[in-house]
Amino acid sequence: MKKTSNRLADGREIVYYDTRDDAVRDAVDRRPLDRPATSSEIRYDPLLSEWTAVTAHRQGRTYHPPADECPLCPSRDGRLSEIPEPDYDVAVFENRFPSFSGGPGPAVAGGPHGLFAAAPGAGRCEVVCFTSDHDASFAALTEEQARLVLDVWTDRTAELSRLDGVRQVFCFENRGREIGVTLGHPHGQIYAYPFTTPRTERMLRSAAAHRDRTGGRNLFDDVLGAELADGRRIVLEGEHWVAFVPHAAHWPYEVHLYPRRRVPDLLGLEEAERAEFPGMYLEVLRRFDRVFGPDEPPTPYIAAWHQVTDEVPERAEFALHLELFTIRRTSGKLKFLAGSESGMNVFINDVPPEAAAERLREVASE
């Protein structure tokens, strides 16, 4: 993998990742851009003990442009985009409308009783373009291309984890208008947060309680072992990875992909694990696109890597894993987060996890 770092016209960094060592990436961004103005702030919720980002500048971000004006396509035929090169393998650049940006600053408590704490929304947000082909998808990538994306996620995790004030690095993909995607080009994002996210904090607390209750056993290891022993929700097994629908799945079709060997982040994966992952993941994605039948449009989904940085004291207890889920519950119908889910965070799933796993096994590639 060859890595080349350049700057866009407004000063943001763009990084190209190529499979060829002789690739040259020296195109200049000729757009007349001003430096981006961001106003990200994080505010603390004392009732839930978690942070919320307030980002007024994101109201003006690009929304569903026509394909011939896509900002993630290469710059060709006189049309200038976010990516100055006429072609690329994988390109990563700083988001022009980031939820988090800049260096850290102290949290300041305000208001009566000091309950209204706030701090700069420090961190970094990046866009990851998986391919220059506007009409492709991650599932359409070759194993070589998917392996390059895995290596990119790993490299960005290493780079962003070293930034001052960053506490967690989150690599993810939103696919489909139903999810809320505003750009159709196949891409994902990476958020470098200035705090450990509430979901990760909750998993770490659960792991600590399990360790205390069982005399030192690891919760993630036991969950994976229990799913393998039960077997009904296993979707796909490899030598180094296991894909399963969790026992208490929140979403109609939800698959968790775990390495058999527990590691805390992407950097901990060994070569054999990296080599097997692309084929496993691509197969799961392709099954997602077939699960509702041949006449349905591509399945909308969210794919989310869960990992922890060196900043987390309980790092050794955490298990890297990828969660993939869709909000489509059946043909032509979506699962909306209504009163119970949005108001109380109590999910109600209409699709039994065992039935979802059986369906995902039925649509395996021939």
Image (cartoon, rainbow, N blue to C red):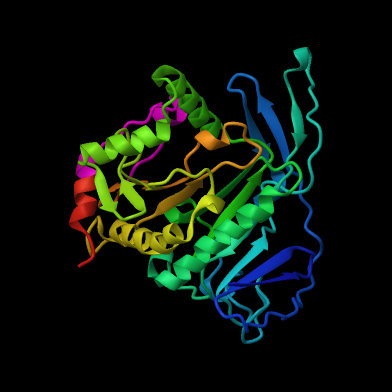
240 inside magenta stretch = no
* Image coords of residue 206 (percent x, y): 46, 25
355 inside magenta stretch = yes
Relative to the observer, which residue lies in front, 135 or 13?
13
* Image coords of residue 185 (percent x, y): 51, 67
- Quadrant for the N terminus, please: bottom right
* 263 horizontally vs 225: left or right: right
Relative to the observer, which residue lies in front, 298 or 158?
158
Q: Residue at x 78, y 18 (%)?
A: 111
Q: Residue at x 70, y 31 (%)?
A: 43
Relative to the observer, which residue lies in front, 236 or 104?
236
From this viewpoint, which residue is outermost toward the bottom? 77
Res 185 visible = no
* Image coords of residue 84 (percent x, y): 68, 77
* Image coords of residue 288 (percent x, y): 31, 56
- Quadrant for the C terminus, please: bottom left
Q: Residue at x 45, y 60 (%)?
A: 274
Res 86 visible = yes
Q: How many numbered marks does the figure carry?
A: 0
* 104 horizontally vs 265: left or right: right
Picture quadrant where residue 351 is located: top left
Q: Is residue 2 above or below residue 183?
A: below
Q: Which residues are magenta?
A: 334-356
Q: Is residue 340 above or below residue 94?
A: above
Relative to the observer, which residue lies in front, 161 or 314?
314
Q: Residue at x 56, y 53 (%)?
A: 267
